[in-house]
Image (cartoon, rainbow, N blue to C red):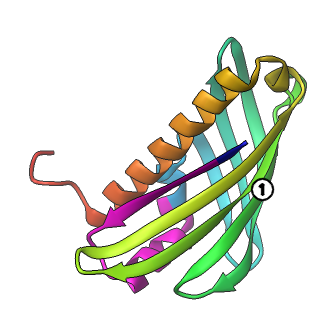
Amino acid sequence: MELSGTQVIAADRDTVWAHLNDAQTLMACIPGCEELTGNPQDGFEAVVKQKVGPVKATFKGHVTLENVNAPESYTLVGEGKGGVAGFAKGSADVALAPTPEGTELSYTVDAKVGGKLAQLGSRVVGGFARKMADSFFDNFKTQVEGPGEDA
């Protein structure tokens, strides 16, 4: 399953890049993330609780950064295991480009699931994946820009 999107963030590219490599920022942005440790050089370990359709699971996983081209782009590669619920693995190509409004962050995610999750069907899993990606990047924009005037 593949997802892609863009988000314009009102901050310069170096600021956005720094946040993309910060464990605290990433933890605050990942829906259901209970723990995130590590660093960009060695990778991150994460614990994420999620409910996908009728399946609830705690995923424990590892994420590494590859193809790092600071401050322009990188590839996040990760895998999470959720016990009897199954597993999720995939990669996300993230690119940053300067714009008059700040920085355009574009992403392409390629994800695969197995176990009980795969049995839910592509419509349920695809909808969940889209919601997770949208939530992450909306949360990321808020983290970088800070609360807006209407917050």
Query: Magenta residues?
Result: 3-25
Q: Position of residue 50 (x, y in %)?
A: 64, 29
State whether residue 52 is above or below residue 69.
above
Q: Which residue occupies the foreground of this view, 108 or 31?
A: 108
Q: Is residue 24 magenta?
A: yes
Toward which corner of the image does residue 58 lie, by quadrant?
Answer: top right
Q: Is residue 43 magenta?
A: no
Residue behind mark 1: 78
Point out the image quarter for the C terminus: top left
Provide the secondary structure element on which disc 1 rests.
strand
- Give the crowd class for mark 1: few <14, some 14-19, many >=20 residues within 10 Å: many
28 relative position to 126: left or right: left
Residue at x-position 60% and y-position 42%: 34
Toward which corner of the image does residue 41 lie, by quadrant?
Answer: bottom right
Q: Which residue occupies the foreground of this view, 82 or 6?
A: 6
- The amino acid type, in three-letter code, at marker 1 is Gly
Q: Which residue occupies the foreground of this view, 126 or 15?
A: 126
Residue at x-position 36% and y-position 83%: 98
Q: Position of residue 106 (x, y in %)?
A: 50, 65
Residue at x-position 43% and y-position 80%: 97
Q: Position of residue 22 (x, y in %)?
A: 53, 70
Q: Position of residue 99 (x, y in %)?
A: 31, 79
- Let me know if residue 39 appears in the view: no
Residue at x-position 75% and y-position 46%: 111
